[in-house]
Amino acid sequence: MAQEPKDVLVRMHEDLQRALEKAPEDRRWVMVIDLRKCVGCHACTIACVAENKLPPGVVYRPVLEQERGTYPNVSRAFVPRPCMQCENPPCTPVCPVTATYKNAEGIVVVDYEQCIGCRACLVACPYGARTSDFGYTYTEDLPVLEGAIVGRETSDDYEVAANYEYGKAWSRENHGSPIGNARKCHFCLHRIHAGELPACVSTCIGRATLYGDANDPDSVVADLINLPNVVRLKEELGTEPRVYYLV
């Protein structure tokens, strides 16, 4: 009996384990988004918000929507838009304090403790992939039931509890970082280094979002980025995005 093919999530986990055995500079993390499979469910957006505990106004992975055609022949197209993780990022040279930079793995990251909140990088990004954290909460000025339990914390404590990014817990109490800082998608590096796929990849109901090391010829993404129906956003700018779309 022929063996059933592995689910692509299983394959990507195997790809990830191989990549983590390599030196950081030998990896080339890329994301492939199959627009033919995206149904606009926004599960990736919600998963990202939950994983990174994002406050109001901070969204790392919106899903852009477009209406196509004319009545009665109308359809909708959906384009998830994470940070493009550019090879030549326009956002890094404009930072006056070098708070945003490419790490050893080629991922564009933000040093929250270095960032002064000038927002120059927000203006420089041609993809609109950066946001600023103004310290808002969803429950601000709302009547919150005292003692209502959310996990182990009360509901009014939950939004100021620490989030976990870049390998560190960041408390939102006393208006500390990342409040006041620029924020962006970082391919869930804290998950990657723990051997887990990015939250948006794991939760995509249509397996439309794929992730891995393009320097591994046996990886799922290495095959996909060479297909003839691959495009990247605003390639004419010379940013060399690491996010590829199948159309």
Image: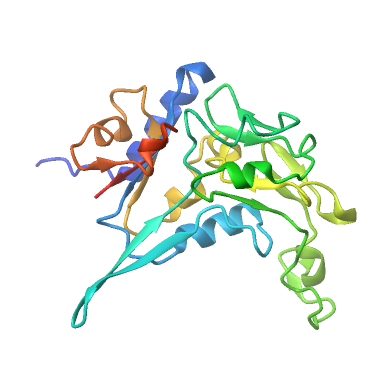
Whole-percent x and y of residue 212?
Answer: 40, 34
State the residue at coordinates (85%, 49%): 176
The quadrant of the image that shows the N terminus is top left
Residue 188 vertical placement versus 238 (above, below)? below
State the residue at coordinates (76%, 58%): 134
Q: Residue furthest right?
A: 174
Q: Is residue 229 left or right of residue 56?
A: left
Residue 100 vertical placement versus 37 (above, below)? above
State the residue at coordinates (61%, 32%): 92
Q: Nearer the viewer, residue 190 or 76?
A: 76
Count of number-bearing discs: 0
> Toward which corner of the image does residue 227 lie, by quadrant?
top left
Q: Is residue 208 left or right of residue 122?
A: left
Residue 117 vertical placement versus 221 (above, below)? below
Q: Nearer the viewer, residue 242 or 29?
A: 242
Whole-percent x and y of residue 237?
Answer: 42, 36
Q: Nearer the viewer, residue 133 or 118?
A: 118
Whole-percent x and y of residue 151?
Answer: 71, 65
Coloring scheme of the render? rainbow
Whole-percent x and y of residue 98?
Answer: 71, 29
